[in-house]
Amino acid sequence: MSLVLNREELSDYMHQIFPQVHRDFVVEDLTEDKITMRLVVEDRHLRPGGTVSGPSMFGLADVCVYAIILARKGRQSLAVTTGCSMDFMRKPDGERDMIAHCTLLKLGKTLAVGDVLMFSEGSDKPVARATMTYSLPPEGSAAAAFG
Amino acid sequence: MSLVLNREELSDYMHQIFPQVHRDFVVEDLTEDKITMRLVVEDRHLRPGGTVSGPSMFGLADVCVYAIILARKGRQSLAVTTGCSMDFMRKPDGERDMIAHCTLLKLGKTLAVGDVLMFSEGSDKPVARATMTYSLPPEGSAAAAFG
Amino acid sequence: MSLVLNREELSDYMHQIFPQVHRDFVVEDLTEDKITMRLVVEDRHLRPGGTVSGPSMFGLADVCVYAIILARKGRQSLAVTTGCSMDFMRKPDGERDMIAHCTLLKLGKTLAVGDVLMFSEGSDKPVARATMTYSLPPEGSAAAAFG
Amino acid sequence: MSLVLNREELSDYMHQIFPQVHRDFVVEDLTEDKITMRLVVEDRHLRPGGTVSGPSMFGLADVCVYAIILARKGRQSLAVTTGCSMDFMRKPDGERDMIAHCTLLKLGKTLAVGDVLMFSEGSDKPVARATMTYSLPPEGSAAAAFG
């Protein structure tokens, strides 16, 4: 129940494995079962009308859960997303970053589940919620993905 | 943003409208955006192996969100469930009641969303999570259901 | 990619393992990747207003996917439901049985996914849809459930 | 129950409203309740390892359902995504386009639901499934979004 990577180590590792998008995401806070992630909103994340796009919010939620699994399981982790559910509740503000608060609800041997609430920075009304499920390969296994 | 029904009024009204199942559910706590509900687990809620059944957990989550909508909108509310997502994370203990903590994430004009975390009483490890979405009829509308 | 249990064997086995509810469910048709299941609607499945309850529809969808996993993997299968998503689209007719058409989308080593469309008998407008995900224990494993 | 826009009109309109991404998506086929959409996979849709990214698949599913609503309701439609559920079942092939087959399960006054199965071109094993729900503004209403 302790972190294998701290916030700095996790950030460094994400920059290595996601070279194209690492500037999009900033780990703001990290504990054993919670992570706060910022999406640095830029033009490419927007939809006509100036709102943050659905795929960008999906990506933010997915990165949150993946990152906290990495922080708990370590760099060799081969977790793959197997499911998601999302609810879009309010219009995001395209001129503000998005802040995601993620709680790791379960980290089992083969399955992890994380819940994410997303806000436009400065607001306390949630823009969207997501639950992401990950399949975890058995330890020592090379293959694994996609159950 | 205030309650139209308090805990006692909500409990009384639920007993009227759900005569067959009102003994199953007890409103433990109620605020403007949170409700805690107990499922009094009995044999009919169990599956072989002594765990609480999936349909019972679905019902618990659904009642939570419906109840807090009633408490906020009043007895005339005609909300209907339009969607749900659930994740089952641990084995519930069939010898204990289930306690559901529900947060109302959105109560708009036509759509409500509530999140529910369910525990076996006495444990702090969530057994299941659910999100329920409800369609709300326009005020003054008689028809409404099923969008 | 072939059936381990045929329709009669599957029905017999379901009657053994679900003694309390076996009369509710009838396997109408079974192929390698599809199953059709009838919910024999009775008073206990209804909500005030004469519609089939949400928990009853959840149960129907869950049984469909569990049954086709059994038919493919055999009686020793220890599959457990890990997730579900449902959309409720039309009011079910409480005076008719419900017919569920389920497609098994994936049957992997550790994960199965099935999709279910539910109708009131005699109508071609879907009442609800559901996706159920199951975790499958590694073969030869005794424990397994809840990843 | 008829189309307001045919395939060419729908394609033209999508090019207008999604100038940045219109080259990504090609409407392959369109009927009253089904649409087939191609995602022209390019480098920007890929993840390390050469698979199509989750956000790209989310975007594909979302565009499918939005497009068929447009085709049925017309250009003035103000539909907004309110929910999604997805299951990721197999590894997509990053060297092939993705083909999405979408069925419109419900098109009500205030709610639409579409189901999407996604394949790597040339394979009959589904890579992912998605259900997207949209909120539809009351006709004649200017505002509307986010219920």
Image: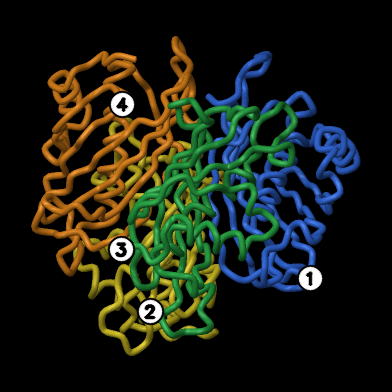
Chain colours: A blue, B yellow, C orange, D green
Q: Residues within 10 Å of mark 1 (few under 14, many from 20)?
A: some
Compared across the picture, whether D48 is left or right of B127 comes to right
Chain on which label 3 sits: D
Compared across the picture, whether C37 is left or right of C109 comes to left
- Helix, strand, or loop for circle 3? loop
Asked whether D8 or B12 is in front, the reply is: D8
Determine which residue is flagged by label 2: B8
> Which circle marks residue A70 in the picture?
none
Chain on which label 2 sits: B
Determine which residue is flagged by label 3: D2
Q: Identify the residue shown where x is 13% and y is 59%.
A: C94
Determine which residue is flagged by label 4: C33
Mark 3 or 1: in front is 3
Mark 2 or 4: in front is 4
* Number of numbered discs on residues: 4
The lab-note entry on whether marks 3 and 1 share a chain reads no
Asked where in the image residue C43 lies, by quadrant, the reply is bottom left
- Which residue extends farthest top? C140
- Is residue A144 in view? yes
What is the C-alpha distance between the residues marked 1 and 2? Answer: 44 Å
Mark 1 or 2: in front is 1
What is the C-alpha distance between the residues marked 2 and 4? Answer: 50 Å
Q: Residues within 10 Å of mark 2 (few under 14, many from 20)?
A: few
Contact (CB < 8 A) between labels 4 and 1? no
Determine which residue is flagged by label 1: A95
Q: Residues within 10 Å of mark 3 (few under 14, many from 20)?
A: few
Chain on which label 1 sits: A
Q: What residue type is labelled 1?
A: Glu
